[in-house]
Image (spheres, rainbow, N blue to C red):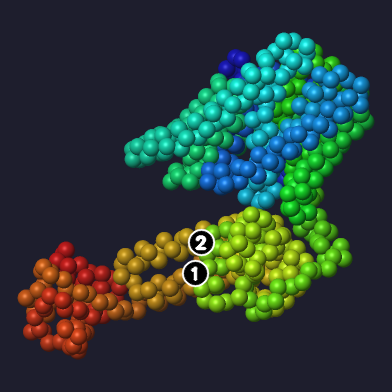
Amino acid sequence: MDGLKFFHQLIIILGFSIPVIYIFNKIKLPSIIGFLITGIIIGPFGLKLIDDIGGIQLMADIGVAFLLFTIGIEIRLSRFLKNLSEILLTGGMQILCTFIVGLAIGLAMQLSIGQSVFIGFILVHSSSALILKILKDRDDENSPQGKISIGVILFQDVMVVPMMLLIPFLVGGSGPDALMIIWKLVKSILIIVVILVAARYIIPFALERLVTMNMRDVLVISSVVITMGIAWITESLGLSLAIGAFLAGLALSDTDFTHQIISDISPFRDVFLSVFFVSFGMILNLDFLRENTGYIITISLMIILIKATIVFGLVKWMRYPLRVALLSGVLLSQIGEFSFVLASQGFENKIISNEIYQTFIGASVLTFMVTPLLVSLVYYLLTRKNIFNPARQGLHPDERIPVSNHVIICGMGLNGRNLAKVLKDTAIHYVVIDLNFQKIKKAKSKGDKNTIWGDASSVEILRRANVEAARVMVIAISDRFLTKSCLQNAKAINPKLHVIVRTKYLADIEELLALGADDVIPEEFETSIQIFSRVLKMFHIPNSIVLAQGNIIRNKSYGVFRDVRYTQEAFDQIGQILAQGTIETYFIGPGNPIIGKSIRDVNLKAESGAMIINIIRKNQTITNPPSEFVFEAEDQLILFGSHSAIDLGLKILDGSL
């Protein structure tokens, strides 16, 4: 594509996107739908402002690669490997079940065996870009439905390779033999393992050398090169750009560079990803859609219903609650971008007719547009209407755990496990609730009988934990929706319950307080308190004052950091504390330069403002020592003065001034 033409088309895409996205934000609809409509308007079947989408498609692929890279970084390699067996099981079962349904549909349409198999192939895939964008916008990647959806789409992406290899068989060609296909699959797995290992140990080493140069632009360029370089390698070896980018992100997770790299990549990702959704809208043939509107809408609804039902059934079979099954089902209910790759190959090889191909394109774009709306609707119903609450369905709670005045811990992550250990050591009764069946099973095997597998937002589960008799509840889970629903239901049952909520989302603080949270602990603010506490200790501020300052910051729900009311009041309190004097001890070690000198010789009060009020020598306390007192090794001095005076005085006593 001519460079100037490409630049012209990019300006058209971004220029038309601005008003469309503005309108969609005003009417509170997902921006993804706005991008799709932008593509339809300016594409070859709309106003024909862009008729060649080859170069645009390249930018779209880059956007998906950047998105998967940032998702890979945030998932963390350790967590990914820990859930690998569940990912393989869920992804494998989803592909198998959906393929069988697609095959049956093809045969029911009186298509040939090869065509029916191909229908199964293109039906199994869901959209990595769409699902990850929805999860990202909702900060829902670490929720149960987020983990399930990401695991399924990654497994689907890997399976594109054998499906592409099988296309020659479906048209009656010789194609590769069975051993070749098996070898390709084994090779794909080996490539993934080698890239993960190499990137895990080589790239952080190289980045560390680059960081020492203290050149921000070098790190930005390096981040882009790493993302696209590994993506290019995987595509060259027969896998996709998206898989390579995800592996690159996964390899760099749990390193010191994670947060900075995400910051550097995000602007590139957002621009390119917008282009992806616009380019997707461009492929919709409006003429064919007008002529076959009812037929295409029916096919679209059937695809959504079939795929959502299959995923819903699988997630329920894996013992997840109704809420997670519903959200997972709608998230994975659309047709994916890799289905288009397969469909175009099938159309070129005459496996499917032009009518089937155009119907597939039209139905797929419609499923893309409907999915964000369905996800928003399900979240709305779950949050506002609470129609899936077990208590509303007339369910009766099981026998309650026989404890009272206890602590309910929601979530067996690091925070939950640490709290449970402390409570156990201090003989305080507690009950743990978690959705991860393996964690609950492991806890029970270690003797923790008061553990419940289930959804902590369920009224039935809360009653099972005897929430009416509980004293404290600690909600330490990563699912934002589950956190709010759990808080709301627990407070409705027991208004006197003291609820402590951990969150990493600053935007949720006010809502959590409004829902009844007694204490909200934002991870970022607590990290800030730890940082300034350690800095103050370096300046010899006593622990009591450091703790007092931390409490002032935490008071009024971290208003100081959130720049809301009480800010000046809090800083005035801190100023009053810092203005007061403090006491510090100083031990005279062997070789100290003041040994053999008198208090008059050192002249500490005149030089620093700090005053020696007591000296402890051989377990004897000397109060108000005279100026002729001579210092000896192992004397312990008790100093009094302002914080700055103490800091200066300690330097004088050390001989560093």
Relative vertical location of residue 80 with respect to residue 478 in this rendering, above or below = above
- Gap in Å between the C-alphas at discs 2 and 1? 9 Å
Which tag, 2 or 1, sits closer to the chain's start?
2
Mark 2 neighbour density, 10 Å: few (under 14) some (14–19) many (20 or more): some
Residue type at the position of mark 1: Ile
Q: Where is residue 266 in the image (x, y as percent from the top left)?
A: 55, 39
Q: Nearer the viewer, residue 284 or 179?
A: 179
Residue pictured at 58% horizontal, 63% vertical: 446
Residue pictured at 77% horizontal, 27% vertical: 122
Determine the image quadrant of residue 298: top right
- Proximity of marks 2 and 1: CB atoms separated by less than 8 Å: yes
Q: Nearer the viewer, residue 178 or 160?
A: 178
Relative vertical location of residue 63 with respect to residue 605 in this rendering, above or below = above
Q: Which mark is residue 553?
A: 1
Q: Where is residue 278 in the image (x, y as percent from the top left)?
A: 70, 30
Q: Relative to 248, is 358 on the left or the right?
A: right
Q: Where is residue 538 in the image (x, y as percent from the top left)?
A: 32, 65
From where the camera sits, is residue 642 visible?
yes
Quarter holding the N terminus? top right
Determine the image quadrant of residue 405: bottom right
Q: Relative to 525, is 48 on the left or the right?
A: right
Residue type at the position of mark 2: Phe
Tag 2 residue: 525
From where the camera sits, is residue 28 visible?
no
